[in-house]
Image: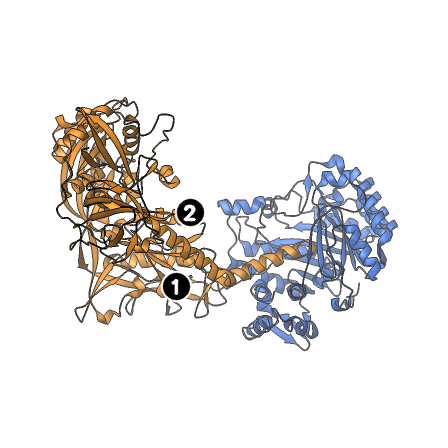
Amino acid sequence: MPIRNFSIIAHIDHGKSTLADRLLQATRAVSDREAREQLLDSMDLERERGITIKASAVTVSHHCDGQDYQLNFIDTPGHVDFTYEVSRALTACEGAVLVVDSTQGVEAQTVANAYLAIGSDLDLIPVVNKIDLPAADPDRVAMEIESVLGLPAEDCIYCSAKTGQGIAELLDAICRMLPDPRPATINETRALIFDSHYDEYRGVIVYVRVFDGALKIGDRIRMMGTGTTWTITELGINTPQPQKVTQIGTSEVGYLVASIKTLEDVRVGDTITLDKYPASEALPGYEEPQQMVFCDFYPATAAAESSKKSDFEALREAIEKLRLNDASFTYEVQHSEALGFGFRCGFLGLLHMEIVQERLEREGGVEIVQTAPTVTYQVLTIDDEVVEIHNPADLPDPAQIKEIREPLVKIEIICPDDNIGDMMSLCDSRRGVFQSQQFISEGRQMLVFEIPLAEIIYDFYDKLKSITRGYGTMDYEITEFRADSLAKVSILVNGAPVEALSLICHRENAEKRGRSMLLKLRKQIDRHQFEIALQAAIGGKIIARETVKAVRKNVTAKCYGGDITRKRKLLEKQKAGKKRMKSVGSVQIPQEAFLSILDQSE
Amino acid sequence: MAMPQFDHSTASLPQLAETPSTAESILRGLQDAGTCIQGAYVHVPFCMHRCHYCDFFTVAGRDQWRSAYVTRLLDEATVVAQHWPGPADTLFVGGGTPTWLEPPDLARLLEGLAACSLLGKGGEWTVEANPETVTEEVAGILAGAGVNRVSLGAQSFRTEALKALERWHDPDSVPRALAFLRDAGIQDCSLDLIFAVPDGGDAVSGWTSDLKRAVSLAPTHLSCYGLTYEPGTPLRRRLESGAVTQVDQDIEAVLYATTQSVLADHGYTQYEISNWAQGDQVCDHNLNYWRNANWWPLGPSGSGHVNGTRWRNRPRLGPYLEGQGLSEIDTVEVLDADGRAGEVLMLGLRCTRGIERQKVIAATSLPMRGQQRAAAIERHLESGLLVWDDDLLRLTQAGMLLGDTVLVDLL
């Protein structure tokens, strides 16, 4: 039976998941009665946010031109941060269905995903979706696809995932236009791991695409990257209900279970071969995911000394468990003077960070205190060594630093003509350098800027959405690390530097950033019996100063019979709060201060 | 009246066997243990208007229940009297506004209470009053029943401040009330005043004029409170919403220092953080609170304390009126030794006299928090907020302004 391995790629909310469901229904893989909305998104969180986070694979069959085709549909995430996950899924495919909303048109992620697919040598089938809506303008959108992506407008399939219009045509096109998988090139077995899930009962479920040879139940397999070996206890395909099989042959897609307890042992992108007859070379194309955004997670209840350890352990467990389902974030134990024990975590981007936090809280049942994100910096030392820094506190002594390099991104913004001016000034204020402007269609343009990642990880996306009243879209990719006039701004409390509060920023913005941090800090620190000097400094040079005045009056005016218990409890609460504070010299700084002042908004 | 010699060293009093669930069991326990009660508090919740800074249990617009309330309260007092271990030193009728009762009801309440003999002969009997409610008739009723002390809620003599406090009385009603009371024979009168009221004017000159006016009326006692934004009050919500701006604490400190110096100049002695008296005319009833003595509450929301057990009556008018006998108890708290020691310090240090060395030693030698407390006391002695006066530990002048900074470490 001919096989078609394909993905659907789209800008967020362009109807990818609905289309996927409709395709499955059309192949009778899912009966109408059984159909759940957006079946492939198996997590609550995904469905709530309308975002597909994890890739899954579904195998169905379709009859076309007198023969049955096996369609292996590999779902991909659809957000700016998940380029890496998309790339893993795309590697397992020969083709992709590019979905564009006919009421919206080509968006920033349409472009980014299409380039990613083209870069993976995939054949594309352009689909103009949601044509049932009154606002649909399929011809204009088809022209956009042609002018921006170079895919002929007449090749576009018009469809409505909602009404089912064009779905049969699309299934036929998948069979007819997408290429056969490449035949095996070597005799030894090689299978690409493109995803993995963690199942409480069966351990890690590994999703694979077999490129050479086959996998059978009972096979002793070896992960070529990690060198670990396992015995396959279960093989299967999702139709979309899991269905056990005895083998997965060349070009096929399925899952395997091999009593793998933790995802630490499974590297997505790794190649599986047979332990007895191993391939000499792994499949190409795998890259370690690059975490560009970092922040700390601390257990929120780290307050009480007695429970500190167990909260930390609960957080560790939750992180380890989540990591089973998401290989693309990293974590390491972090100890903050202010917040105690926690984890420094690395993410692909901001949304990824948000999702990880929410999943930890929801699925792991832990409460998290999260510090503000920072990017990865490269520091060139005077010994010409390059050190990667994920935390301003880790910066070497300034005397040891030759230069600090920061990650730059190429950002593509698609927005209405009316907002071009405002978007230009936004990028400008964020140290962006204009690269190009491209016509998309009547009334819409694409702007390309080079901009430091650090400048867009905080609130850039929110600003873009508010400037364009929701119509603007963006995508970015990291281009390089480049040296700039960057400096570490230290925060001093009564002369003593507080490492947890230091930050790296451009010298031009240092005073403004420093001052805004001091103002926030001033609001958070209670008045003490003495005046407290708050200073921001670069090296030995003070660039901003604020003062917390000495406390003058702090006394309960009324304390009669009925007030006693309440006043005592109030004082006890204050006392407990004081215990949680971090002492810098004789100054007590509340935990909240460390969080709120890390918030970069002004 | 003379400053009583407090020697209710709590350690020597018998403990209640277990957490009591009703007032009755507390009362019975008392009797069995032979404990005495130093004070009684009677709550009258009715008010003409509920002021937005007030966080007491009060009701406005339910005046039709006043008469029934008096009947109900006297019923409770009768039951309490049956178990009463012996005459108390003080009786305090507060609210609310007790004098908002119709004169016949007020007379019935006071005479009924007198008949219950909760208060010993020569004891201090205080009634709280709103200046406008004190007529010649009311003054006569008070004095006739045996009330010997009245606390008037003057708050301020300036209309703008009274308006900001949602008090509607005419400032001249204060001297009028005082005259009626004195004519009736009640010489021991106290005025309540509030400073740091956000009334839009100059805080220092406004407050100074309030103080001058107050002392010119020669009350025997003054309570001066910095305005507190109590949680749950409309005032607090206005503060949080930004509709009201709190007077800066630097200014509040000046206002407090002004209070201390003006009142000292006029012969008033400060005996507690917010209380001043001419000579020895302190409020014994309130001193009971700060000395951790025992007292009994009557009426909804009243709080009681007996030997480390604190409780609060249910603060609901309807259920109280429908019930009979003792008030229903809402919450009970039995403190452990550490908790009690913390309260001894928290309350005792409010008094300018301070705390006896033996009590400090007791509080600092407890196994749990004793050492912490000892260290905190040392620290605050060093920073000048605490001082030893022979065998008494007290807050210094600076410490008075930063009482909570000290107390938070001593709990």
Task: Please say whether residue A384 is visible from this viewpoint.
Answer: yes
- Residue A336 is marked as 1
User: Where's residue B167, x and y in %?
Assistant: 64, 44
Q: Which residue is drawn at the image coordinates 81% and 46% (left, top)?
A: B76
Q: Are marks 2 and 1 in contact (CB under 8 Å)?
A: no
Q: Residues within 10 Å of mark 1 (few under 14, many from 20)?
A: some
**Judging from the image, what secondary structure is the residue with disc 1 in?**
strand
Residue A245 drawn above or below residue A295: above
Q: Amino acid at mark 2?
A: Glu
Residue A410 drawn above or below residue B386: above
Q: Are marks 2 and 1 on the same chain?
A: yes
Q: What residue did someone put label 2 on?
A: A363
Q: Depth check: B95 or A364 in front?
A: A364
Which chain, by letter, is orange? A
Quarter that holds the N terminus of chain B:
bottom right
Q: Nearer the viewer, mark 2 or mark 1?
A: 2
Q: Depth check: A327 or A348 in front?
A: A327
Q: Amino acid at mark 1?
A: Ser
Q: Depth check: B60 or A265 in front?
A: A265
User: Where's residue A107, x and y in %?
Assistant: 22, 36
Residue B122 drawn above or below residue A466: below
User: Where's residue B105, x and y in %?
Assistant: 81, 41
Residue A441 figure quarter: top left
Which chain, by letter, is blue? B
User: Where's residue A46, x and y in %?
Assistant: 35, 40
